[in-house]
Image (spheres, coloured by chain):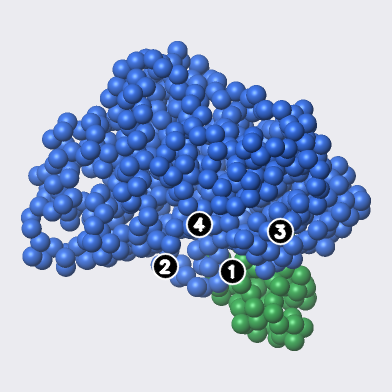
Amino acid sequence: MIQKDIRELVLKHARLSADVNTLSDLSDLYAAGLTSLTTVNLMLALEDYFNIEFPDRMLVRRTFGSIQSLAEAVEALKT
Amino acid sequence: MSRPLDENGPPTAPAPEGRAIRRSRYYLSDAFVVEHGPAPAEGPVKETGVILMPPLGYEDTCAYRPLRVLADALARAGHVVLRLDWPSLGDSAFEAVQVDLVASGAALVAAAAQSLRTRGFTRIAGIGVRGGGLIALAASGLDELALLGVPASGKAFLREERAFHQTAAKAYGHTPDTVKALPEGAVEAGGFVYGPRTVQALQQLSPVTLAGAGQLRRVLVIYRDGLAAPADFLAAFERTGAEVTVSSAPGLGAMLENSYHSELRPEIEAAVGAWLAVHAGQVEPVAPGMPTQLRLEGGITERTVVLPGAVGELSGIFCEPPGGALPGVAWTFFLNAGGIRRSGPNRLWTRAARTLAAEGRPSLRFDVRDVGDSDGTNVPHPDLEAMYSESSIQDVLQVYDWARARGAGEIDVVGLCSGSFLGIQLAARRQVRRALLFNGLAFVWNDDARASGVTSHIGASLFDLRRWRRLLTGRISPVAVTRAIVSKALLAGAAAIARLRGRRPEDEVAVLMRVVMSRGTRLNLISSEGDPSVSYLERHVPPDNRPALTVLPGVDHTIRPVWAHDRVVDLIREN
C-alpha cells in the first residue's frame, strides 16, 4: 500500500515534530511540523523512491499537505 | 598599458579581534583564488591549511560574502585559507557549457592542496558548501573535510536546481520564439547553466559512495537546517575509520538563499572554527608565489587589482585585450548590482568583460565597500537602502580617478539595479562617455525614492531560493509569484500617479538625466518588460527629455534567463 511507503518516507525525511505513527492519512503535515526545507527533502525522497518527478503544478502546499494527498499525487504520476 | 596595474593595496586588513590578517589574490590552475591568512608580522601560522570550496550557481552568488567573512575569521584564528572560485564561475576561466565542473573542480582542489603542502603545511582541511561539498568529496589531497549542507546526491542537487528554475521561470514572462536552445543535456537553474558534461558527472556523484574512498581522517557534517544527516552517509565515513563530527549549527539557509541579505551565522563560524582548532601545531610556510594574471583564450588577460579604499581594500579585476590596453583607450566599468559581487548577476559582467576584451576594449569590474571581495561591513544590510549610499559613490569615484591616472581614456559604465544608480551618479560627477543602465529603480536617493518603496520592489522582484521553498508550503501564493513583476510594476505606476499630483513637471531625476546628457554622456536605459524601472522613468522624466529606453521581453529584474545573456552582452558591445 502506497500510504505505508509514504509514511516511512515522511518519518525518515520530513523531521516532523509529531510522531508520524499518531497521524492519520488525512492529518495536516504542516501542522505536524513540516517546513519549507523539509518539504524539499521529502519531495526529493519521494521522487527517488517512486521514480517519479513532480511537475511544477504539483509543487504546491496541497500536494504535500497530508499522506493521503501525497499518495494521490504519486498514484497520478505513476499511471 | 602605460603603467603597471599589479598593485596589492594595503598589506593588512582591519581585524576586529584575533590576529591581524592579510589577503592576497592570484590564479591557480586558471581559477581565481583569494588567500586569507595572518599578517606576516603575526609569526607562524596553524599547520592546517584550509581550502574553502563554495557552493555552485545561484547559491554561490548568495554565499560569496558570508564565506569571505568565514575565511577572514579563520585567518584571525591563525589559519591560511584558500577561497576558490570554481572553474566557469566568478572570476575564474572557462564557460559553464564547455566545462566538466566536477572534474575540473576536483583537479583544482587537488592543485590547491598540493600547493599548500609544498609551502609547508602538514595537514589540509577542506570546507565544502552544498554542491562544492560534492566536488570536494570527488577530489584527492584533502586530509579533513567539513561538509556544509552537502546534497544527498548529485542527482538530488540537480533536481532541486531544476525545480527552483521551473517555478522562477514563471515570472520571466513570455520567452521569444527565436531563443537558442541550450546544448542537449544541459540544465539551467537560477541564471546559471550546468553544461552537459557537468550534469553527467553530477548524476554519478553520491556522498555515500565517495565517502568510501577512505582518504579522509576527520569529517565535520553540518547538515541542512532542521534536518539530520542520513545515517548511511555518516556510516560510510565511519567505516573508513574517519573521525566523524556532526553539528546541528543552524544558519545554512541564511547563507545560501538570498543575494542581498545573506550572512554568516555565528553558530556556523563557531562549529567550523572549533573543529579546525583541534590541531595546535604551527608552521612557517613560504609565500604562495602564484601569478596575479590570468591568460585566457585569444590573448586576453585578467589581473587582480586592489586599491586602498576608505574602509580597507577595494578589490577588482582588470580585463585586457590581446597586447594589453593601449594608453588613452576607453575603459568600461562594470558596477555591482546590489549585493552581487563584481562578476555580475548570473556572471554576466565577467562574460561581457571578456567579450569586450576580444574586441580590443579593456574593462574593470570591481566591488564597492561592503560588497563581494571588498572590505566593509561583515553583517547583512538591514535594508537595501545601503546599496544607494554616498559612500558607495565615493568608492566608484576613487576607482575612476585611479583608472584615469593609470592611462584610461574615456570611461563607459555598465550597471544593473543599484549599479545603475552608481553609474548615473558617476556620470554626474565625472566625465563618462556612455552609460548603459539596466533596471534602474532609483537614480537619485532621496525621500521620494525611500517613500516609493524601491527597496521592497527589488525584494519582491527577486525570486530566491527561500521564496521558492516557502511556495511549497503555501506561505507564498503561486499566483503572486507568477505575477510578481507585473503587479509590482502596476503598483509602482499607481503610486506614481498618486504622487504626481501637484508635482513639478521636472523633478530631481529628470534634472539629473538632463545634466548627465548635457555633459556629453550617451545614456542608454534598458528595462526588463514589466520591471518597475519602466514606470519609474515614466513618472520622473517627461517623454521629450527621456533617454533611449530598450525593453527586454521575457526576463526578470536580474536577467536570469540564460537565453537573454547573449542579448545583454550584445547590448553592452553595441552601446
Instruction: For mark 1, give the secondary structure.
Output: helix
Residue B304 or residue B567, whichever sits in front: B304
Determine if marks 3 and 1 fall on one subunit.
no
Which secondary structure lies at badge 2? helix
Is label 2 on the same chain as label 4?
yes
| Chain letter of the residue beneath label 3 in the structure image | B
The residue that label 3 is drawn on is B271
Residue B563 visible at all: no
Vertical side of B298 occupied by B352: above or below: below
Element at badge 4? loop
Q: Are marks 2 and 4 in contact (CB under 8 Å)?
A: no
Q: Which mark sits nearer the N-terminus, 2 or 4?
A: 4
Disc 1 from disc 4: Cα separation: 25 Å
The percent coordinates of residue B28 (x first, y second) are: 64, 28
Q: Nearer the viewer, mark 1 or mark 4?
A: 4
For label 1, the residue is A36
Label drawn at residue B379 = 4
Label 3, label 1: how many angstroms apart (C-alpha)? 24 Å
* Distance from Cα at disc 2 to Cα at disc 1: 18 Å
Q: Position of residue B372 (x, y in %)?
A: 49, 44
Mark 2–mark 4 Cα distance, whole angstroms, equals 33 Å
Picture layout, residue B319 above or below residue B147: above
Query: What is the drawing colour of chain A?
Result: green
The amino acid at mark 2 is Val
Left or right: residue A1 compared with residue B20 = right
Mark in the foreground, 3 or 1: 3
Query: Which quadrant of the view contains residue B327?
Result: top left
Which residue is drawn at the image coordinates 86% and 42% (left, top)? B215
